[in-house]
Image (tube, rainbow, N blue to C red):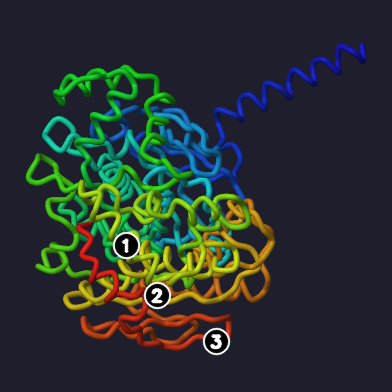
Amino acid sequence: MALLEMKFCILLFCTIMMFAKFQPSIYLDIHVVKIESGPIIGEENLNHFAFKGIPYAEANRFSEARPFSKRWHRILSFNKFGNVCAQYDHWTYGFHGDEDCLNLNVYVPKSVIESDELLPVIVFIHGGAFMFGGSDFYGQDAFMREQNTILVTINYRLGILGFLSTEDEVLPGNLGLKDQVEALKWIQRNIEAFKGDRRNVTIAGFSAGGASVQLHYFSPLSDGLFKNGISHSGVALNPWVMAENAREKAFIVGKSVGCKYHDSKKLLRCLKKVPVAKLVSAAKIFQPFLYNPFSPFGVVVENDYANAFLTDHPQKILENRKFKPRPWITSVTRDEGLYPATEFYNNKTLKQLDEKWNDLASFLLDFNSTTYDNQKKLEWSKTIRKFYFDDERINDENFGRLTKLMTDRLFKNGFYNSVVLQSSYSKTYCYYFEYETEQHAMDELRNTTNFLGVAHGDDVFLVYNNRKLRDYTSDEKTIGQHFIEMYKLFNQQNIVRYAGKQIEASDGSTVQCMNIGSSSDYSMKVLDKSFGEVDFWKSLNIPE
């Protein structure tokens, strides 16, 4: 009898739990949100709810995304990250991800649930050279501690699937950026269900995500979808953003995977049938030196094709002021070029780079596709080496010179020129990050425990805490907190302060940034053209 009673109790418990799974509203502390697709619940955390992997759009291969069409009536749970987009990854030099990847995550403070107040919204666009990465790499804990902001992180198509272009109406390009537009549209339609204010949306991004933010300022498709933006360590004028010879690259990809056509339509039909891993991994044929150039597929000018994201080069858009003036914050770290230079330190790669500089420099510094004139590329390579190394070898002892070279070329130059041009027409603010964190965003690429510099992303991960990093020091937490306060004030009032101190706008002739050295060391600093060796790089006249 006791055994029968026990079996009955177990059966009753299982029945209740099964019912609870499909009727989560029986738990009074679980928050149900009704979005356009149907009712959802997320993951409950100490001070916030996390709604992960919500689909915002759907797309066939090489087609523009369209709003997610499926609907449901029962409550569905979104408590796990969705697929990252299919990619050939720098960290692993391998393929992973999925084509079904257009999803986003929404993080909502618990304090807003019983309030009628709508909170400001931060939309974060991940980095990864338009080639790799995902929204699950960036954490929400620092934002959620303050209980005053809703954070949304998004996935978008990458590499060949997101940025291949035949430079005609068959495949104009920029699909990954158009995915971002669809995510912003979804937010406009749905964020109020999470108690977010759709009129107070700030877009922020890191690296390729930062460049994406500035590009949204230039796109007619993004108009009305955000209020202002923040670009960390990536701007539209960085040399790795715009793709050269995109049409030629598309047919080279085709040939490499067995689609040997010279007609755009036939090429596209064939590419749609290629296994995804084989197609995406074809990107490596454009990277003869490790993962360089790190953005073989990027943004293109679409001319006047239907639904074009970008109709002119960013340089011309800025020079001709053909964009809507909105406040903008941008930033750069002292030693940005540690991505990708970190990977070269303390191994045979530096010796290879030293001995084969004239062959490898154009790939490392992203000017190989800017011209077919090999003699010109050779001249640039020799001139650059002489300027940065004089007659010295490229080795561990001179690694700081290599870092400076890559920082100047790949990041600081575009940063400086973007601030000059955008600030002549629109409120533009910047900060320069020199604080030496105890661990670094580039640690996974390092071959040494030696301190190499203030790396690409060292500031960003004080805000969007990466789950692979250990707990932060009190100093790091303080700096991260200052950044979050800067975000909120910028979103609500278009005022830019760091640690209570006003960041003055640049004015088109003077570039002035908040220089951040530690939690207590920060002040305004004027940057001249020696920052990034602007005049030297301009003298080379490399067509970007």
- Please, what is the three-letter code of the amino acid marked with disc 1? Val
Instruction: Answer with mark 1 or mark 3, whichever residue precedes in sequence.
Output: 1
**Of the pair 426 and 300, the residue shown nearer to us:** 300
Q: Is residue 8 visible?
A: yes
Q: How many marks?
A: 3
Tags 3 and 2 in contact by the CB under 8 Å rule?
Answer: no
Q: Is residue 463 visible?
A: no
Question: Which quarter of the figure has residue 535?
Answer: bottom left
- Please, what is the three-letter code of the amino acid marked with disc 2? Leu
Residue 405's place in the image compared with 126, above or below, is below
Residue furthest front as drawn: 391
From the image, tell me which residue sits under label 2.
Answer: 489
Measuring 37% from the left and 26% from the top, which residue is drawn there?
279
From the image, tell me which residue sits under label 1.
Answer: 235
How far across and down, in percent of the image, does residue 358 sit?
38, 54
Q: Which mark is nearer the camera, 1 or 2?
A: 1
Disc 3 element:
loop
Disc sitting over residue 146 in the figure: none
Measuring 39% from the left and 58% from the top, which residue is drawn there?
205
How far across and down, in percent of the image, does residue 433 sit?
48, 75
Question: Which quarter of the figure has residue 14?
Answer: top right
**Of the pair 532 and 141, the residue shown nearer to us:** 532
**Of the pair 396 and 171, the residue shown nearer to us:** 396
Mark 1 vs mark 3, CA separation in Å: 26 Å
Disc 1 element:
loop
Q: Residues within 10 Å of mark 2 (few under 14, many from 20)?
A: some
From the image, tell me which residue sits under label 3.
Answer: 521
Mark 1 vs mark 2, CA separation in Å: 22 Å
